[in-house]
Image (cartoon, grey):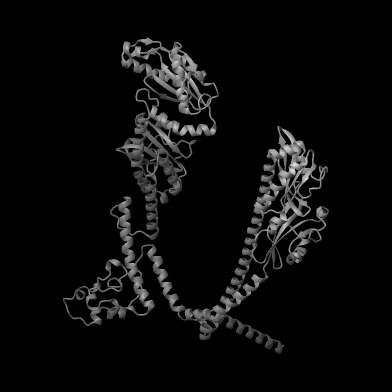
Amino acid sequence: MIKINDFKSKKDKKIQKIKFSLSKILNPEEWSLNGRFLYLPTILLILCLTVSMLYFTNTLTRHLGSNIENQLKLITSGIQDEINKGARFAQTQAFSLSLNPEIQKALETQDRDLLKKIVLPYLDRMRVVSGYTSLSYHFMIPPAVSFLNTQDLNVKGTDLSGEKPLASRAGEELRMLWEIVPGHHGLNIQVVCPITSADSLLGIVEVSLNVQEIVTNIQLPKGIGIATFVDKSLKSTLEPDINFTEGKKWIYFQKESYRKILFDLDADINFLSINKKGQIYYSIIPVKNNSGNIIGGISINYDAKLNQKENENAIFYFFNILFLPFLAIISALYLNIKRIKIFFARLRKMIIASHTNDFADRFETDHIHCLEVLHCNHEECPVHKNPSLVCYLETGSEAISPEWRNSCVFLNKYGSCLNCPVYVLRKGDELTEMRNVVNTMMRLWKTFLSRIGQLLDEVLRTKENSRRILSLDEVSSRLEQMAKLTSFSRDIKGVYSKDEVYEQLKYVSENTFHMSRFVIFEVNSSDNRMIPVLDNVPSEPLCKRDILLSPELCRAKRMTEEICSKNNPALCPFFNCDQTKYYRCCLPLVMGGQVGAVISFLIPKSEWDTRSEQLVIIRKYLDETAPVLASLRLLEMSKEQALRDPLTRSHNRRFLEEYIAQFEPLSKREEKNVGFLMVDLDYFKQVNDKYGHQAGDAVLKQLVEIMKKNIRSSDLLVRYGGEEFLVLLPQVEPNMSEKVAEKIRSSVEQYKFELPRGQKINKTVSIGVAEYPNDADTLYKAIKFADVALYEAKNQGRNRVVRFQKEMWLDDQY
């Protein structure tokens, strides 16, 4: 029993000893000098070197594989491009041969000698020009009987319908077909094209290119090889004298150096994009026939053994380079780590406090004054009178702030801070230097934030006369808002129309202010209406319909001031929103002393505290927008007046010229049928002579209203002359223009024109009709021909519609 207790006691002591040793190792405060300056740096060095070596090795390996894969992908893409290029060349050749009239004649007469005479020299030239020595032509007569084969001129008369189904299909379907097929020399690009004359099939031309030749001619980097292969079941199609290597599943055509690689891959080719087997990377391009079956492919191989050896050398060199410097750096850093950590912990505390505008915390520094160092007893000295004039790095040649640089009262005596004994005593070591610098920066930072806050309040007109120091978040937010506002102001100055301005406002509302529901009303003073020009959810109107009919009901428009339901939900009776969930805000956009637009939006009550300050910024955006919108309105009014007839408000000839300049190219491209009606009021001069010019003006206005009712809204009405009008029908069915013209003529004939003095008269119109492109090849010529038809209508007795006829135009040229 005693021995057992002794054993347990020894075991417990041993466990306690292990725990004590572990606690010393795991607790940095209990580390010995060897642990701090020898063991720890050694462990860190080994760990860092190990991680660095693993990372470097892994990076090299990944980069090697990535580079090889990228190279194989590029080569694969290049090979596919070359094959597609060869296919396009073969298609071009087949198409060119099918259109050759001499070849068509030779096939029609079945003159084989003539066909040889034409084709063989042409084939020789094409082989030289294209570089494709395997290029060959095979001409067949229906259904697929061999007529002339450039690969074997002695073959003739054999029916190849069973062997060449593609040729039979091309003859039956009368269209060009192509595919990659196994040939006598491996894979061939085969293009067949029917040769026809007057819709009758004369023959079929087959153009062939050898894929192996295309692949062999590609220039490849060192270490990369290419091989083509076909399905072993197709061996019977190959010539007996062709060099190839026969595997388990495939027959290869390649250089000797890649034969072993291809045999290794033969058993498990899976046609993936990039494959790897040992140090061999390979990519395989499958070749399928028109039935979708794989009949062969192209293999691109890359041997990475040389690259792997280079990687190993680089890793060894990297290890030798890093070991000693890394050890020295870790040792040097560790010697001062504790002191530096203490400094940074205090600095962190000060920086965090400064972020919330607390600048009271400072580093403790020894108070050293020039009066003590220099033993100055001159009472007239400004420093003696005001000891605060001596500050470390706040004045002098090395002052942090450029504003105070070279302003020290002692610079004339010492020339530089480095020569000043006070500077030298206060400077100390690097950490002491940083303490003094941080203390100075805290003072300057406090001054800066105080000043920047005042400036931003003045620019944004927020919390006037406020002396509060903004936090860094607030300064950042305000500056970001100012930057976005400046960008917005610059962007809208280059807009072309009001719609662009509204779209800019929409973008800002959604992306800058994150408004989920808003609407912009434009105030139309002339019509006394408010029009919603921008509504992100038009199905849920924010205002009741009364506002749209009478702008004076809008409080924001009437009072020219901001309206918000925050304090008074019943402030506006026309709000159409859920007042229990949202606050409604309406901001007027004042242009030239009047409200030109109103933006109304919702702010969720839960977000009011964080988003209410945005109202100030939104007002600034509206201030920037107002003059731009005012200018665009004036420009729009000026342009509208310049392009419309002031009497009838129909478009004038200047507008017609601008319209046709843009419309004519579109009409030609889209092959539109455009109608032109030249309308002239019969005996209009008699109205002016008998009833006066005011009566004539009234008749013209009523005539315009009649014509507008009888044409579409997309049609164009232009006052072409005094009583002459042009109607442009942008897209009509051929010969439909006369029906529109007759409808107008009939309506005018039945209408009673009311004169200013109460009289009513009947008038008629004569109409000339022309259409583009049926009557003229240009729009202006069609207008002229409509005018010619109008004069013909007048000559025939007026009050009629006349369609332009070619015999009406007697001149040779337009």
User: Is residue 613 in view from this perspective?
Assistant: no
> Residue 531 in the image: x percent, y percent?
41, 33
Q: On screen, 102 above or below 246?
A: above
Residue located 39% across and 68% down the image: 350
Between 808 and 221, the residue placed more toward the observer is: 808
Q: Is residue 587 left or right of residue 251?
A: left
Disc count in the image? 0
Q: Is residue 133 left or right of residue 535?
A: right
Q: Would you identify the image quadrant in which residue 556 lies?
A: top left
Q: Quadrant of the N terminus?
A: bottom right
User: Is residue 115 in view from this perspective?
Assistant: yes
Q: On screen, 558 above or below 315?
A: above
> Residue 402 in the image: x percent, y percent?
30, 67
Between 21 and 225, the residue placed more toward the observer is: 225
Q: Is residue 314 left or right of residue 765?
A: right
Q: Would you identify the image quadrant in which residue 119 lies?
A: top right
> Residue 24 in the image: x percent, y percent?
55, 82
Q: Which residue extends farthest left?
A: 380
Between 414 and 121, the residue placed more toward the observer is: 121
> Residue 55 in the image: x percent, y percent?
59, 71
Residue located 43% across and 33% down the image: 544
Between 429 and 806, the residue placed more toward the observer is: 806
Residue located 36% across and 65% down the image: 358
Q: On screen, 691 above or below 438?
A: above
Q: On screen, 716 above or below 141?
A: above
